[in-house]
Image (spheres, grey):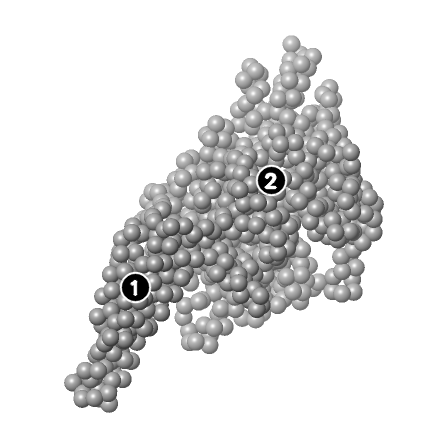
Amino acid sequence: MPKMVDVQNIQFYYKSDGEDIMLALKDITIAVEPGEFIVIIGHNGSGKSTLAKHMNALLLPTKGDVFVKGFNTKDEANVWNIRQNAGMVFQNPDNQIVATIVEEDVAFGPENLGVPSAEIRGRVEEALDIVDMTEYRDKAPHLLSGGQKQRIAIAGIIAMRPNCIIFDEPTAMLDPSGRREVIRTIKKLNKEENITIVHITHFMEEAVNADRVIVMEDGQIVLEGTPKEVFSNVEQLKEFGLDVPQITDLTNELIKEGIDLPKDILTVDEMVMELCQLK
Amino acid sequence: MFKDITIGQYYPTGSYVHELDPRTKILVTFALIAGLFIINTFVPYTYIVAFILGVVFISRIPLNFVLKGLKPLRVIIIFTFLINIFAGQGEAIWRIGPLSVTGEGIYKALFMAIRLILLVVGTSLLTLTTSPISLTDGIERLLNPLRKIGVPAHELAMMMTIALRFIPTLLEETDKIMKAQMARGADFESGNIISRAKGLVPLLVPLFISAFRRADELAMAMEARCYRGGEGRTKMKELKMDGRDTMALVTTALLLVVLIVHRTMV
Amino acid sequence: MSIEVENLTYIYNPGSPFETKALEDVNVEIKSGEFVGLIGHTGSGKSTLVQHLNGLIKPTSGKIVVNGIDITDKTVKLSDIRRKVGLVFQYPEHQLFEETVYKDIAFGPQNLGLTETEIDERVREAMELVKLPFDELKDRSPFELSGGQKRRVAIAGVFAMKPEVLVLDEPTSGLDPRTRDEVLEEIKTLHDRYKNTVILVSHSMEDVAKLVERIIVMHNGKIIFQGTPRDVFKEVETLESIGLGVPQISYLIRALREKGINLKDDIFTVEEAKKEILKWIRSRKNV
């Protein structure tokens, strides 16, 4: 089976002011397996969004190749196939909703794909049900909250039946409850719908449930591993200007004081258990 | 501040009129406009008024809500009335300085004012009973045959949809930027025309920049959702005309015939 | 400069089918020189409340008294109030409009009618506060700066007006953790240096907890409770029920207490938690 997304040694240059060339991505290689849930973390300007846009042919690498389900993004004939397979949800919920009615917006993708009318209706219903927005189907998008708009954007992608969804900082502009709604939806897509997820964020706590975490800094991958592996590098993460979950921070501090705790505690429950078992 | 504009606001009731095919409603509206320009006496107005009242009744939209749409246009209506009242020929009934009001003037002024009122009410019924999206759909379908001669039917409809989608967003944004600049001491309300126009720069520049940013992001999001123009596109809601549309169209046609007959007879 | 809000009610679109009560009988007092956090989720009324404080929104009923003057009184000149109460909106970089960073920051001071030298001084000072290098950036276009720098230019534009009361509506939303911490630090510096009244509006408990002296929690247009961060974070259940996050440490302490471990109940930072847990572990070893 081909990799879902296969990024092979890519580099990407931005041209600014015509002359200056900025190296936004320096030799990145990532392979995403079908069904995987990957979180890419880094602060603004680390190149994470640039990388995301390579994964559905919105940007093409200056050097190297990106394959989505075996299709090279450089081959123009593959573009629509790639975009249907690897959907993308963006940061600003307002600027990705096209239609004036929720269900019309969800239908936008399938309509572009030329899906027959009757089938679109079914897909829209299913997609709205998955993101739990069925009761808002007739509403105007501008009356919804940020989290709700973002779920509509997600439904719009699901209705295209992709195998993989790339989330480009979908929670950056949301309040805590909106953020929770979106994260819950993303997890559900991965667990129940078996959709491969590439989630890009600068919120560390969103990485806790991932299968794999990739930390980017200055156009490069600087850390990679399971959440536990990555989070145990507390000092290094702080150096990159990233937040460490308070629990991990606390664990690190306690270990420094000579308390015998495993380095990779991530959740409150784990911490409580470990503390109670201390001899 | 922009919220009191009610002309053309969709007013869903799920009535017979609402459920008609948008194409039917667009055609009926055009027939009505044509009718208003065919007639040349007061009597046929009664048929048109009866027709409009009938539509309002069936649509279950409160009459005063429909009439509220006239409010923002009252200045134009009064202006039309005044221009016509002084433009008549013949014997003056009444003089104010160089202006004179004649019997013909009064007749014409009333005639034009009623025409304008019915025009506004008639067309606003279209938008009151048709959601923007199905209106756009209807326009797209009606224009479709003209694609062969180069009318970009799909593109026009898409532009309309996006405009409708972003109007509330941009209004909200205008309000926000205005407040933010006011908090920095900007003054949008006093001074002469030139200083007022200059005062708008802190509002307009950010607004344009934001609109361009939105357009850019939206274009990217649409591309990511496989948008590539109207070619090969399907629609979730297929438009279908049925018996009710035929009935509406036949009734309208009858009205037009009556109006034409009336004109040739008188 | 003190602010007193008395029985403030605000209704959007009164008399229409879209009528909504944004604020309901709000009473709050903010003392001169105080640093308060105003917390609530989107739609709780917090933004509506702060827009009342400098007269951008007029109350449906109630009074707002700024330094002894009731600003709802028609004879009060709002321009006078606005120069005393500065307001930084959410995503303030969306209001930048000038050709250069300097001119944009100078916009507010200019509207105050200051002289060129005074304006120059203020722009320099504001840029220094938000850590933007003056010589390097003053002639640059604000639109070609990074997101974090744009945010700082916008905030400096309000700092430069030297308001006696500074209100910041979600000043860190959308920023990455590093920039967020830096911006919060700059706000703190400003407060320490000028001892002005600062109202920080936020939905992030963790940001606010580190900085402010008092937290005011809003929900559905009402103030539901207020107090020191310590007191407020004890209310884990209430905060959760109204959709606000509580620092992870608060959850941990609560869970440990439920296990019968005797820890203080008002801990919300990593450092305090570390101290308390160490104390507990060591006391057990001694037994």
Amino acid marked by disc 1: Leu
Residue C135 % position (x, y):
69, 64
Q: Residue at x 81, y 47 (%)?
A: A65
Decide: few, some or many residues near mark 1? Use Cα within 10 Å; few <14, some 14-19, many ≥20. Answer: some
Residue occupied by mark 2: A158
- Report how far apart the C-alphas of labels 2 and 1 lie in the structure: 49 Å
Q: Which chain hosts label 2? A: A
Quadrant position of residue B228? bottom right
Query: Which residue is at a point 67% across and 58% down the rendered structure image?
Result: C145
Q: Nearer the viewer, mark 2 or mark 1?
A: 1
Mark 2 and mark 1 on one chain: no
Please identify the quadrant where the C terminus of chain C is shown.
top right
Picture coordinates of residue A54, whole percent (x, y): 73, 48
Q: Is residue A164 above or below residue A18?
A: above
Residue furthest out toward the top? C287
Q: Where residue B206 appears, x then y in whole percent?
A: 55, 62
Residue C94 place in picture, x, y as percent: 56, 57
Residue B191 in view, yes or no? yes
Residue C157: which quarter of the image? Answer: bottom right
Q: Nearer the viewer, residue B162 or A41?
A: B162
- Please tell me whether residue B149 is drawn above or below residue A227 in the rendered image: below
Q: Picture quarter containing residue A36?
A: top right
Residue at 40%, 44% in the rendered image: C29
Q: Which mark is residue B255?
A: 1
Q: Residue at x 71, y 62 (%)?
A: C136
* Chain letter of the residue carrying label 1: B
* Residue closest to the eye, C84 or B112: B112
Q: The disc labelled 2 sits on which kind of residue?
A: Ile
